[in-house]
Image (tube, rainbow, N blue to C red):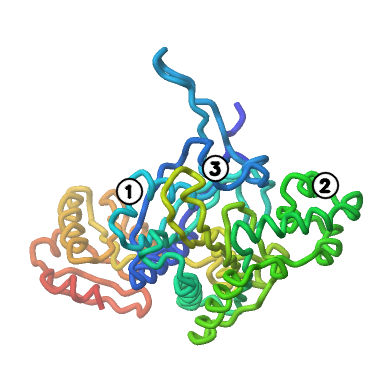
Amino acid sequence: MATLKAVRGTRDLLPPETELWNRIEATARKVFARYHFGEIRTPIFEDTGLFARSVGEETDIVSKEMYTWEDRARAQSEKSQSLTLRPENTAGVVRAYIEHKLGESGLLQKLYYIGPQFRRERPQKGRYRQFWQIGAEVIGPPSAGSESPLRDAEVLEMLATLLDELHIEGWTLELNSVGSSADRARYNDVLRAALIPVAPRICADCQRRAVTNPLRVLDCKVHEDQAIIDSLPKITDSLDQESKDHFAAVTAALDAAGVAYKLNPRLVRGLDYYTRTTFEFTHGGLGAQNALLGGGRYDGLSEAIGGPKAPGIGFAMGLDRLVLTLQSTEPDQKAAAPRGVDAYIAPLGEKLNAAALVLARELRRAGLSVELGDGSFRLRKSFEAADKVARRIVILGEDELQSGILTVKDFASGVQTKVPRAKLAAMLAK
């Protein structure tokens, strides 16, 4: 019988690597809390129509990469429904915003999420078919200031803070404006006309996009097409004055806050719902596919899926790629071991197993991490096991149990001491 393995494009995350994942997530939660974001958890699958209407049917995500199936009706009164594993989380958050009438509070909703997404892409370094994202959205009625360029700048400043607190150095913020929906329509016409003479020389996907959705041509990753794409008209030349003023206010706020950025007029992102500000944070440690995270403003997304006017801005960062970046900048993270539990309790004989569990319970309730040995082990085996995972070993024999004086050995110093049980927790905590 063949050995079962993880499905292609997925992987198991194991200790000690998960220690690094947990550190990233914990840091993100702390930073988000300081900016008054609360956590939202949406379903892992949604109605397929949500992504078709929001992300865009001509995007690679919807046209090629989604995991979609027909959920058959179980009764004659029911209709079958097309369902999709979420390929991104913004659409689900906006759907929840509409469904739960969060806009009726009149306040900005600042929401973050941490969870898996699914796309049927070609697996490669840092890119998986099940991948994890940390993301956040700021959305609300215009009366709450959701259209303000200050919201854009605040999100970007928060991300700069998060990367700094994760000790990721050398990142670059790339920034652009794709304008309003009217600007995009105007630019699409300009781009479509400019693509006619060069279409025969670009890849088959871009030849199709040149007709159906010219803006998506700018997302092309085919090396041979890049020189042609670089020669195409820039979207910044099609912006109206309102969009230009909005973008100027964003960059002015970033300048005031000391957040460095680089303008990139080709940056349109791969989702159709973006308007005005779009951005990516990149890092040289990731190679050619160097995006750490990205996002942008989506002022018409709520209306596109049947909700009220609710401008918003958000981002998503791939945890897989963030971990790779940390491992490239902190080489010891590749083999970083857990910090070691505070104590390993070694009962001397199986009759002392229950007493050892009681002692472990006391120490754990005092906030210490404890590994529990077994009385069937010989003392040498207990020492070998303890030395692999713990900073100290606590020996619990009949004498220690009766006297209340426990034998503790510190592996780093090699010192062995006697410690009263009442003072054990405090000693181990040092």
Nearer-N-terminus badge (3/2): 3
In front: label 1 or label 2: 1
Q: Give me the residue at 34% from left, 54% from top.
A: 103
Q: Which residue is mark 3?
A: 51
Q: Which secondary structure lies at badge 1?
A: loop
In front: label 1 or label 3: 1
Q: Which residue is mark 1?
A: 101
Position of residue 66 measured from the top left corner of the image (x, y, whole percent)? 60, 40
Residue 166 visible in the current orientation: no
User: Is 206 rendered above or below residue 311?
Assistant: above
Q: Give me the residue at 62% from left, 76% from top.
A: 172
Q: Amino acid at mark 2?
A: Gln
Q: Are marks 3 and 2 in contact (CB under 8 Å)?
A: no
Q: Which secondary structure lies at badge 3?
A: helix
Q: Give me the residue at 30% from left, 79% from top.
A: 415
- 234, 222: nearer the viewer: 234
Position of residue 353 measured from the top left corner of the image (x, y, whole percent)? 20, 50
Q: Amino acid at mark 3?
A: Phe
| Circle on res. 207 | 2
Tell which residue pokes out farthest to the top in this image: 76
